[in-house]
């Protein structure tokens, strides 16, 4: 226990200096429209590579950043960097691309997130309709009244909201009728089983049908096989994201994909 405590303290100490040392980077995973087969957006995914400790998993450092309050500075860096990147792609001629950014529950509820986002959008000159914030289902359900207030403020700004990891949280559907979300993301734990387990297939079909009845688009994450893709196409899923199309990759690799898609390859 003493060793674990010391390791945690050292990690926290290193995390406090991560921005000034420029050790963070973003990878981007394409999101694809199933009707057209075209890339329509990207999810920004945070990575930390320490010069000595190497690659540190987000599952390890993000909870620590939330506990210590460092998530606010890190979260702003992610938003600013992601917005600047998609604006750069738009300036290169890919005007309709959107950027999805994960927002932690702590960042969402303990800061003036609306004011922060307005400032970043003004700074990067990105139109608000091209930014999508992803919130986990459990984060949304923690305090519905407060969440609804914040989400309507974001809607006023023009930012869209996706409910991430849908199906793994509180399993309460009533809040979906109260919040101004635009997308549901079906968790990859469902997708990986849709072709082998009838129960998962039934639940996934039900989620897609329910979302469409609520006028929400559905994006399936973690799509890895042609069989999974075929199932989602047959059941009218709107968008997909996963290794079948692309792993999370650096911005320069996304640029190559965009150019190849434009050429028709």
Image (spheres, rainbow, N blue to C red):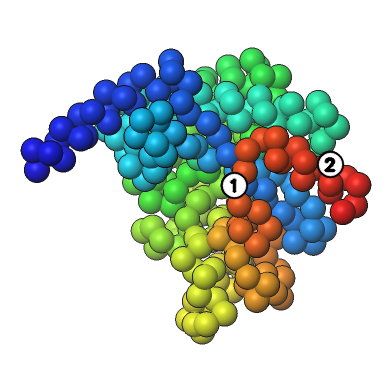
Pick whichever, 119 or 50, lies toward us. Answer: 50
Q: Which residue is labeled 2 in the image?
A: 259
Q: How many numbered circles are shown?
A: 2
- Left or right: 226 in relation to 45: right
Quadrant into which the C terminus falls? bottom right
Q: Is residue 216 above or below residue 197?
A: above
Residue 179 - label: none
Mark 1 surroundings: few (<14), some (14-19) or many (≥20) residues within 10 A? many
Q: Is residue 206 above or below residue 153?
A: below
Which quarter of the picture shows residue 16?
A: top left
Residue found farthest to the right:
263
Residue found farthest to the front:
52
| Location of residue 222 in the rendering, given as x and y in whole percent from the top left corner | 56, 60
Residue 193 can be seen, yes or no? yes
| Location of residue 153 in the rendering, given as x and y in whole percent from the top left corner | 54, 30
**Residue beneath the point at 57% across and 58% down:** 221
Which quarter of the picture shows residue 64?
A: top left
| Location of residue 108 in the rendering, given as x and y in whole percent from the top left corner | 43, 33
- Left or right: 211 in relation to 62: right
Pick whichever, 79 or 25, lies toward us. Answer: 25
**Residue beneath the point at 85% across and 32% down:** 93
Q: Which residue is labeled 1 in the image?
A: 248
Pick whichever, 249 or 196, lies toward us. Answer: 249
N-terminal label among 2 and 1: 1
Mark 2 surroundings: few (<14), some (14-19) or many (≥20) residues within 10 A? few
Q: Secondary structure at mark 2?
A: helix
Quadrant into which the N terminus falls? top left
Q: Secondary structure at mark 1?
A: loop
Residue 114 can be seen, yes or no? no
**Residue beneath the point at 60% across and 64% down:** 223
**Residues under numbered marks 2 and 1 in contact, where contact means CB atoms less than 8 Å apart:** no
| Location of residue 63 in the rendering, given as x and y in whole percent from the top left corner | 32, 39
């Amino acid at each position: 226990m003493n060793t674990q405590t010391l390791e945690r303290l050292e990690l926290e100490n290193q995390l406090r200096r991560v921005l000034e040392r420029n050790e963070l980077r973003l990878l981007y995973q394409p999101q694809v429209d199933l009707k057209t087969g075209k890339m329509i957006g990207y999810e920004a995914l945070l990575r930390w590579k320490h010069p000595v400790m190497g690659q540190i998993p987000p599952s390890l450092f993000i909870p620590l950043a939330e506990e210590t309050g460092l998530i606010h500075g890190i979260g702003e860096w992610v938003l600013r960097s992601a917005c600047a990147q998609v604006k750069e792609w738009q300036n290169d001629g890919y005007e309709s691309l959107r950027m999805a950014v994960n927002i932690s529950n702590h960042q969402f509820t303990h800061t003036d997130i609306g004011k922060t986002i307005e400032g970043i959008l003004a700074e990067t000159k990105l139109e608000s309709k091209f930014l999508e914030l992803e919130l986990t289902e459990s984060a949304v359900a923690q305090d519905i009244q407060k969440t609804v207030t914040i989400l309507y403020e974001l809607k006023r700004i023009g930012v869209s909201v996706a409910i991430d990891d849908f199906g793994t949280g509180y399993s309460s559907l009533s809040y979906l009728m109260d919040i101004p979300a635009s997308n549901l993301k079906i968790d990859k734990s469902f997708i990986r089983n849709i072709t082998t387990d009838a129960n998962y297939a039934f639940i996934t079909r039900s989620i897609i049908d329910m979302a469409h009845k609520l006028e929400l688009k559905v994006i399936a994450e973690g799509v890895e096989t042609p069989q999974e893709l075929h199932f989602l196409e047959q059941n009218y899923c709107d968008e997909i994201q996963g290794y079948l199309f692309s792993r999370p990759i650096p911005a320069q690799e996304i640029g190559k994909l965009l150019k190849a898609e434009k050429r028709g390859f």
